[in-house]
Amino acid sequence: MGEIIISRVYDAESSKGPKGSKGEVFLIDGIWPRGVRKDDLNLDGWVRDIAPSPDLRRWFGHRPERFEEFRTRYREELDRNPDTVRSLLDAARRGPITLLYAAKDTEHNNAVVLRDYLRDRLGTAA
């Protein structure tokens, strides 16, 4: 099973992808990151449907004090979206994957929750 890496899309060193990206690379945000041209990212997929719902995203508003509740609600959404989750699980079983996100906060965002959720499903340690 592969490692699951999260990386901020804006941390790209070159058109090859963000610093530290490994294996298959997936954008996991529901909207395309501002200021990034589509041909600037070397993606294996844009998994829009894995992103938090617009209502949940607006409620969270990247407020750290809401992160634990966001984590719970987002994991519930992921439980209701098994087909999309399965595609990332399958990729992680093949080897390392990198999940790209655009949020400024590197500790309180959907990629952190998704990485942990996938690790739980795969039975891998953090």
Image (cartoon, grey):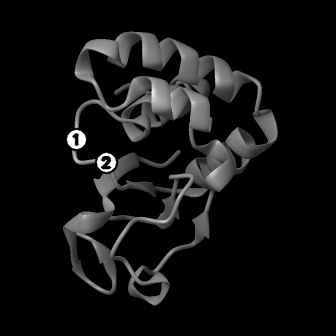
* Residue 114, image x, y percentages: 49, 35
Q: Please state if 47 lies on the left or on the right of 117 as rendered.
A: right
Say which residue label 1 marks: 106
* Residue 115, image x, y percentages: 44, 36
Point 28% across, 24% down: residue: 63
Say which residue label 2 marks: 103
Q: Label 2 amino acid?
A: Ala
Q: Is residue 119 visible?
A: no
Point 32% across, 32% down: residue: 62
Q: How many angstroms separate mark 2 from mark 1 (CA)?
A: 7 Å
The answer to which image quadrant residue 20 occupies is: bottom left
- Residue 17's label in the rendered image is none
Point 68% across, 48% down: residue: 49
The answer to which image quadrant residue 16 occupies is: bottom left
Point 37% across, 12% down: residue: 68
Element type at mark 2: loop
Depth check: give the residue in front, 110 or 65: 65
On screen, residue 40 above or below 46: below
Depth check: give the residue in front, 114 or 119: 114
Tell us which disc is closer to us: 2 or 1. Answer: 2
* Residue 67, image x, y percentages: 34, 18
The C terminus: image quadrant: top left
Q: Please state if 14 lies on the left or on the right of 57 as rendered.
A: left
